[in-house]
Image: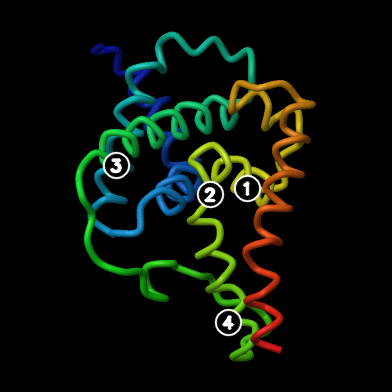
Amino acid sequence: MENPALRAEFVKLIAQDQALIHKVCSMYCRDPEERKDLFQEIVLQLWRSYPTFKHESKVSTWMYRVALNTAVSSFRKESRRPHYGSLSDTDLQIPAAPDTSAEYELKIKYLYAAIDQLSQVEKAIVMLYLEDKSYDEMAEIIGITKSNVGVKLNRIKAKLEKILTPVYDEIR
């Protein structure tokens, strides 16, 4: 595809919405090098599918869908290989929050560790939920029904609560 106008349009689109791709990469990869590789793979898949994007949905919805599908399929390939090492606070890339107390930081660390225990689809739903996406947008991005999004979110919340309640009770 050697259409300069299409190429310029695509580069502008990626520059505007690259934070979306970085969020997906951070959710699925802890290692900085793996995040870079996944970012490149997502951009490549977006580029390959851009000529067929019909603009029937929001650009961000299309980008999330491609990014999440790429991340999940990449994760499946990677899960067949053994991984070594542990997570550190730096790997979690927890943004600075208004409350910087040790207890708050510890709770955030455990929350991200709990999210890391979720399935790939559950992680995607949590990320979209935290991005304040509507149920309709989540359904379109992930490719499930709106009611299924609600059911999955309730189950995810219950799962996270089950994981975190004993930990948070111990911190107090």
Which residue type carries mark 3? Ser
Alpha carbon separation for disc pair 4 and 3: 29 Å
Q: Which mark, residue 79? A: 3
Q: Secondary structure at mark 3?
A: helix
Alpha carbon separation for disc pair 4 and 1: 19 Å
Mark 3 surroundings within 10 Å by alpha-carbon count, few (fewer than 14), some (14 through 19), many (20 or more)? few
Note whether 21 is above or below 89 in the view shown.
Answer: above
Position of 78 compared to 56: left or right?
left
Alpha carbon separation for disc pair 4 and 2: 21 Å
Residue 70 image-quadrant placement: top left
Residue position marked by numbered label 4 in the rendering: 105
Alpha carbon separation for disc pair 1 and 3: 21 Å
Q: Residue at x 65, y 68 (%)?
A: 164
Position of 15 compared to 74: left or right?
right
Residue 45 image-quadrant placement: top left
Residue position marked by numbered label 1 in the rendering: 126
Position of 151 compared to 18: left or right?
right
Q: Position of residue 6 (x, y in %)?
A: 37, 17
Which residue type carries mark 1? Val
